[in-house]
C-alpha cells in the first residue's frame, strides 16, 4: 500500500477589525498566497518526493509550519487525527495567521501500485479499469507510464482480489502489487 496526501484550501477568513487594531498595515486584507479550491498533492513514490521544506516552495512558510506534520503522517500511512474527525485519514487545520487564517482539508489517499504485463493499447487499459472498478472500495484508477494506481476507499482490499480482477479482464499478468 502506498499513500499520497491531498491538501485543499476550503476557506479563508479576514478579521479586518483585528488588522486595524494590531497590524502595522491595517489594510493587509486576506491571505494573498492561497485561494479557496487550491489543491496540492504530495507524494513519495516512483522517484517523486515533494515533501520538502515548505512543500518545495508551493506553500507559505506560516501555513507549512502548521500543516506539514499532518502531511508527513499521511505520507507514512498513519492516522492523521484518530478520534478527532469521523475519518482518521482526514484533518481540518489552519495556518497560524490570527488576522487572516486559511483553512485546509488534509486527506490521506491510500492506493496500490500495479505492474501489469500484456497492456498494449487503450482498449487494454479500458478493460482493466472496468474490471478493477467493479471491486467495492476502489474509487478510481490512474494510468501511469509504467504502472497503474488503484485509489482505495477501503484499505483492506486484498492483493488477491485486485490480481483476480486484472487477470480475469483478458490476457494480462500482474507482475507486482505495491
Image (cartoon, rainbow, N blue to C red):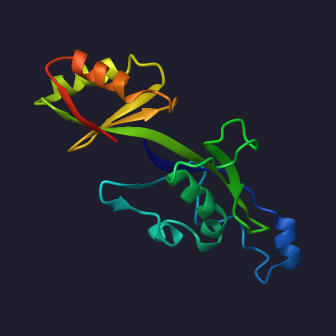
Q: Quadrant location of the C terminus?
A: top left
How far across and down, in percent of the image, does residue 10 sit?
64, 48
Residues 124 and 114: in front is: 114
Residue shown at 42% from the left, 39% from the top: 111
Number of on-image labels = 0
Residues 3 and 56: in front is: 3
Q: Tell me the quarter of the picture where residue 56 sits.
A: bottom left
> Is 29 above or below relative to 8?
below
How far across and down, in percent of the image, does residue 146 sit?
21, 44
Residue shown at 66% from the left, 37% from the top: 87
Q: Is residue 174 left or right of residue 38?
A: left
User: Is residue 148 at least partly visible in the picture?
Assistant: yes
Residues 174 and 148: in front is: 174
Residue shown at 82% from the left, 66% from the top: 16
How far across and down, in percent of the image, does residue 115 sit?
23, 38
Q: Is residue 48 left or right of residue 18?
A: left
Q: Is residue 97 left or right of residue 158?
A: right
Q: Tell me the quarter of the picture where residue 49 sits.
A: bottom left
Amino acid at each position: 500500500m502506498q499513500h499520497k496526501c491531498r491538501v485543499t484550501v476550503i476557506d479563508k477568513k479576514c478579521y479586518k477589525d483585528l488588522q486595524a487594531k494590531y497590524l502595522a498595515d491595517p489594510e493587509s486584507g486576506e491571505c494573498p498566497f492561497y485561494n479557496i479550491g487550491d489543491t496540492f498533492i504530495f507524494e513519495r513514490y516512483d522517484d517523486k518526493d515533494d515533501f520538502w521544506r515548505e512543500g518545495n516552495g508551493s506553500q507559505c512558510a506560516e501555513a507549512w509550519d502548521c500543516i506539514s506534520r499532518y502531511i508527513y503522517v499521511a505520507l507514512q500511512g498513519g492516522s492523521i487525527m484518530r478520534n478527532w474527525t469521523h475519518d482518521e485519514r482526514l484533518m481540518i487545520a489552519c495556518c497560524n495567521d490570527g488576522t487572516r487564517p486559511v483553512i485546509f482539508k488534509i486527506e490521506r489517499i491510500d492506493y496500490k501500485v500495479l505492474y501489469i504485463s500484456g497492456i498494449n493499447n487503450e482498449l487494454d487499459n479500458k478493460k482493466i479499469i472496468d474490471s478493477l472498478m467493479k471491486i467495492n472500495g476502489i474509487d478510481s484508477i490512474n494510468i501511469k507510464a509504467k504502472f497503474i494506481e488503484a485509489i482505495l476507499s477501503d484499505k483492506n482490499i486484498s492483493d488477491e482480489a485486485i490480481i483476480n480482477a486484472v487477470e480475469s479482464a483478458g490476457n494480462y499478468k500482474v507482475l507486482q502489487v505495491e
